[in-house]
Amino acid sequence: MQFSIETSSPFNPKGGRAATIAPTDCVIVPVYAQRKLGPAGQAVDALLGGALIAALARHDIAEALNSVLIVPGNDQVARVLLIAAAKAESADPAGQSAAAQTPRRRGKAASVTGPELHRIAEGAVIAPVSERAFSELSRAAFRAANTTGAKKLLSLLAEVPVGVERARPLAWNLQAQVLSAHDATYRFDRLRSTTEPRHEVGAIALAVPPADATAATLALRRAQATAMGVTLARDLGNLPGNYCTPTVLANEAKALAKRHGLKVQVLERKQMQALQMGSLLAVAQGSDEPPKLIVLEWRGGGRSEAPIALVGKGVTFDSGGISLKGGEGMDEMKFDMSGAGAVLGTLAAIASMQLPINVVGVIPATENMPSGRAVKPGDVVTSMSGKTIEILNTDAEGRLILCDALTYVARFEPSAVIDLATLTGACVIALGHHHSGLFANTDGLAADLLAAGRDTLDTCWRMPLDDEYQEQLKSPFADMANIGGRPAGSVTAACFLARFAKGYQWAHLDIAGTAWKSGAAKGSTGRPVPMLTQFLVERADRNSTPAHAAKSPATAAKRGPKPPSRGPVRAPRDGA
Ligand code: BES
Ligand code: MN
Ligand code: ZN
């Protein structure tokens, strides 16, 4: 899908009725409460001789939010896709008259979304929509557009003001459109022998006011990089265990490194033995597939700047091992490498943004299988840290591979370590499928991750990590057991990891409930790539001098005047 920023569009600064639109197959136009058009829609309407307002007056569009109506156009604009950004008859939130509401919004939002946009919005009835509502609106619009046969699209959704509690900048709006468009067109059909023809949209132009063109172009670049990372994570997650082995993950990492200028190293079983990774190797010993420890480095920041480390659980299939899982839904354990997929997706995103920050990705990759050589309940193993572990349940394998990766990652002297793991069914019981579970030994890191999650609608919820829970991991035979019983299962799993993460700031994201969907819409979600990418963008902004303080979608508004652009893209690893 090809995106572009379009400035010669119905976002006419004069609010005039003479819109100029480059020839297009379909224009997406938001419709507000009481079936009203905004200024951009009115301009398109004028172009089509009042066809839109006529259709709205006939109530051709349904009452419900996100209802769609396709109106035939002319030679220039083949069709218009009207989409309801509000319930047709909804009153404005404050219960004021529509006319009374406009000045309030105008004053508040003018400094945020760009003065140009809001000058043209004068006089229009546009109540802000929530972040989630906008994201769904965009998805519905692009999904509907895909069914029209249109190849070339112009979206006017940048007109919709987003954020009820705090107004979001234009960059936020654009990123949401890009991610929604990708989501609406995502298909995983690599493994089908025949595929239905793809007749979906090929090119999407996002209309913005001319004054916002520069900010919009940067926002678009970042949004596309994020979308690419999400798609990569989804593809890897969806790939089944017989395709996505540890070796394939390692090859994927190598290809990624080549594509985006990262450093990559893949440690083999022999090297893991030399490092005395007895815990990781214990999980791998039951499988015929060789384990891999994948290490990727993005050096976009200064030579001496401590990196942020991302550690992703890469169990390419989790059968449970000798503590074999039940049959029902076991296929979904192909998604047990989603943490690894998210590390690769996030690194792809930040590298393609050329983000000025140092990031290390570490992926312990293995299968968890039963066999004559498999580790058995009761076995005691020695981890790389020297601590011994009594393996009471071979299905609690994620923590066993992560603990050695957490010990290993200390050699990079990271400023923070974040691990991502589909670690416990208990986390799904605790939080369902909305929030990822967040555990952290540092409040600042937790706060930043929570904020990045809210900014991207890829949210997490902080969970406890008190020492009291550590009691549950006592073993009569080793330094610790690998399970802590049924109560607070996601907490004791995190407590196990915490013992290996004492030397640095650390956070653990249990993504068991968020990394994939079950049921009819079964498939990988690509979470938490949006949240992690946002977190790193924020960190990069915070670290860097104003010279490369490029703005992120969520915070652009807070920062006042625009900093100068970053200039030429730096080569990776120059450290300058
Ligand atoms: N990969 C699973 C966790 C999981 C299970 C994620 C179901 C999503 C859905 C993990 O390796 C596992 O098996 N955990 C066990 C731990 C238990 C044995 C202490 C679990 O959650 O049942
Ligand atoms: Mn398991
Ligand atoms: Zn697992």
Image (cartoon, helix red, strand yellow):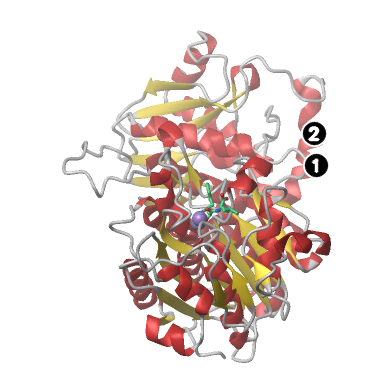
> Label 1 vs label 2: CA separation?
6 Å
Q: Does residue 528 appear left or right of residue 430 in this picture? A: left
Residue 257 image position (x, y, % from top left): 39, 76
- Mark 1 vs 2: CB contact within 8 A: yes
SS under mark 1 = helix
What number is the disc on residue 274?
A: none
SS under mark 2 = helix
Q: How crowded is mark 2: few (under 14 residues within 10 Å), some or many (20 or more)?
A: some
Task: Judge: label 1 CB < 8 Å from ligand 1.
Answer: no
Residue 80 image position (x, y, % from top left): 41, 28
Q: Name the residue under label 2.
A: 103
Q: Name the residue under label 1.
A: 107
Q: Does residue 510 appear left or right of residue 280 in this picture? A: right
Residue 230 image position (x, y, % from top left): 46, 55
- Residue type at mark 2 is Pro
Q: Which residue is drawn at 33% across and 52% down?
A: 240
Q: Which residue is drawn at 44% across and 76% down?
A: 293
Check the image and report above or below for 503 versus 431.
Answer: below
Q: Nearer the viewer, residue 397 or 214?
A: 397
Q: Residue at x 62, y 77 (%)?
A: 388
Q: Does residue 305 appear left or right of residue 269 in this picture? A: right
